[in-house]
Amino acid sequence: MSKNKIAYLELPSTDVSMLKAFYGPLFGWSFHDYGETYAAFSDSGLDGGFNAENGTAAPLAVIETDEIETMEAKVREAGGTITTPTFSYPGGRRFHFLDPNGNELAVMQVE
């Protein structure tokens, strides 16, 4: 059975270092850098990251699943639009989609 729960939150960033300097002292979050354009945050209640590469204008909720290919097909069948096909990243794979109202979300499978 797939998890299918919101497991991660990405915040868009034009300056990852600036956001780390803001959120770290403010809320006590810790960070793990993946280059200059991505930093994962933890100690926030819901893990997430600052992303200067994905191009979203709004925060991105990421849903974790055990069956990414099945979920991509289900999103299409339900009327969603795939905006970024499944791709690999360190630790897993994910895709992005728009719901019928235009909200962008992502689905990831941790490997």
Image (spheres, rainbow, N blue to C red):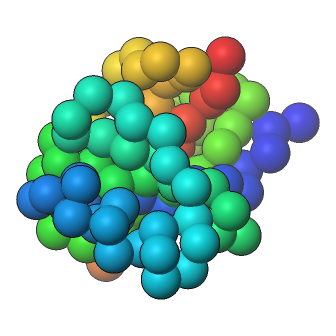
Q: Please tell me which residue lies in front, 26 or 70.
A: 26
Measuring 47% from the left and 75% from the top, which residue is drawn there? 25
How many numbered markers are drawn?
0
Q: Kindly indicate the quadrant of the structure image that contains residue 43.
A: bottom right
Quarter of the picture holding the C terminus: top right
Q: Kindly indicate the quadrant of the structure image that contains residue 82.
A: top left
Q: Residue furthest front?
A: 25
Q: Kindly indicate the quadrant of the structure image that contains residue 16.
A: bottom left
Q: Is residue 22 left or right of residue 63?
A: left
**Residue 70 drawn above or below residue 60:** above
Q: Position of residue 92 (x, y in %)?
A: 55, 21
Q: Position of residue 69 (x, y in %)?
A: 55, 23
Quarter of the picture holding the N terminus: top right
Measuring 33% from the left and 75% from the top, which residue is drawn there? 22
**Residue 75 drawn above or below residue 90:** below
Q: Please tell me which residue lies in front, 13 or 76.
A: 13
Q: Please tell me which residue lies in front, 5 or 41.
A: 41
Q: Position of residue 45 (x, y in %)?
A: 71, 70
**Residue 11 drawn above or below residue 31:** below
The answer to whether residue 80 is seen in the rendering is no
Q: Is residue 6 left or right of residue 21?
A: right
Q: Residue furthest bottom?
A: 26
The answer to whether residue 30 is seen in the rendering is yes
Q: Is residue 36 left or right of residue 95?
A: left
